[in-house]
């Protein structure tokens, strides 16, 4: 799973860079499956403002060679000002679902010097990517995260997922820039499976 997180982190870092460069990636123009209509609901309160999101993509990516998988749910707020991507991972590639359970959201867990033989990144089960619109581009920062996501249902036959999440994102460069996401909920989101 570390490989998948590292690859996703590198992609986000290249797109956003730690100097807060504006990304050329525009999720609003992405044509990935499934289509936003009929994809369930996705909402969250961000710094006190309730937002609804259009699901632009929901994908379960299985890496059979590394025996791991990850679920990505990408949403764009209906006001086109915010994007959220929830990423959940597991150290097993079998099946067309993720486990119904509570996931820890923290892309960069602290390394405990008292346990040098333990790789704390193994306890990372997911993370949140947050972006804001700057004109027709998207700005993504790299955040320290402390949160959780509880998957309440994941149906392999219908390929639909539901759950709740909350998290606090603290900018790694400017610790005074904090994004609080509460009352996050995704319901009956249709996802595709990729090997």
Image (spheres, rainbow, N blue to C red):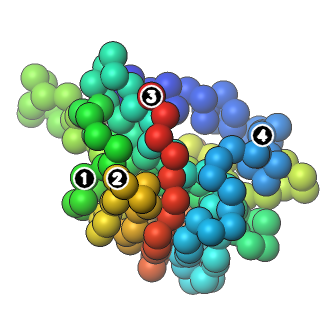
Can you say whether 7 is above or below 36 in the image? above
Instruction: Classify mark 2: residues with Cα within 10 Å, few (<14), some (14-19) or many (20+).
Output: some
Relative to residue 183, is residue 153 drawn left or right?
left
Q: Earlier in the sequence, mark 4 or mark 2?
A: 4
Quadrant of residue 69 in the image?
Answer: top left
Whether residue 87 can be seen here = yes
Q: Alpha-carbon neighbours of circle 4 within 10 Å: few (<14), some, or many (≥20)?
A: some
Q: Which residue is mark 3?
A: 195
Which residue was labeled with disc 1?
Answer: 99
Residue 46 in percent (x, y) is at 57, 74
Q: Quadrant of the C terminus?
A: top left
Q: Say which residue label 4 marks.
A: 25
Helix, strand, or loop for circle 2?
Answer: loop
Secondary element at tag 1: loop
Mark 4 near mark 2, Cβ–Cβ under 8 Å? no
- Judge left or right: residue 82 versus residue 146: right
Name the residue at 79% across, 54% down: 28
In the picture, the quarter occupied by the N terminus is top left
Please tell me which of labels 2 and 1 falls first in the chain.
1
Q: Nearer the viewer, residue 39 or 68?
A: 39
Residue 156: numbered disc: 2
> Nearer the observer, disc 1 or disc 4?
1
Asked if residue 147 lies left or right of residue 178, the reply is left
Q: Is residue 193 above or below residue 136?
A: above
Alpha carbon separation for disc pair 4 and 3? 24 Å
The 10 Å Cα crowd at callout 1, few under 14, some 14 to 19, many 20 or more, is some
Q: Secondary structure at mark 3?
A: loop
- In primary-sequence order, the first of circles 4 and 3 is 4
Of mark 3 and mark 2, the one earlier in the sequence is 2
Cα distance in 3D space between marks 1 and 3: 17 Å
Q: Which residue is at 56% across, 43% downward?
A: 142
Q: Determine the CA span between mark 2 and mark 1.
A: 11 Å
């Amino acid at each position: 799973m570390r490989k998948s997180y590292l690859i996703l982190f590198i992609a986000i870092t290249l797109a956003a860079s730690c100097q807060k460069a504006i990304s050329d990636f525009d999720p609003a123009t992405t044509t990935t499956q499934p289509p936003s209509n009929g994809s369930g609901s996705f909402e969250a309160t961000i710094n006190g403002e309730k937002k609804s999101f259009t699901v632009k993509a929901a994908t379960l990516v299985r890496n059979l060679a590394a025996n791991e998988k990850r679920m990505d749910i990408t949403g764009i707020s209906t006001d086109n000002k915010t994007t959220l991507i929830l990423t959940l991972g597991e150290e097993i590639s079998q099946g067309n679902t993720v486990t119904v359970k509570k996931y820890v959201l923290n892309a960069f867990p602290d390394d405990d010097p008292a346990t040098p033989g333990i790789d704390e990144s193994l306890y990372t089960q997911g993370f949140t990517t947050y972006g804001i619109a700057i004109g027709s581009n998207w700005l993504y920062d790299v955040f320290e995260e402390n949160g959780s996501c509880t998957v309440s249902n994941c149906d392999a036959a219908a390929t639909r997922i539901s759950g709740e999440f909350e998290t606090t994102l603290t900018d790694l460069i400017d610790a005074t820039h904090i994004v609080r996401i509460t009352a996050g909920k995704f319901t009956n989101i249709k996802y595709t499976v990729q090997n």
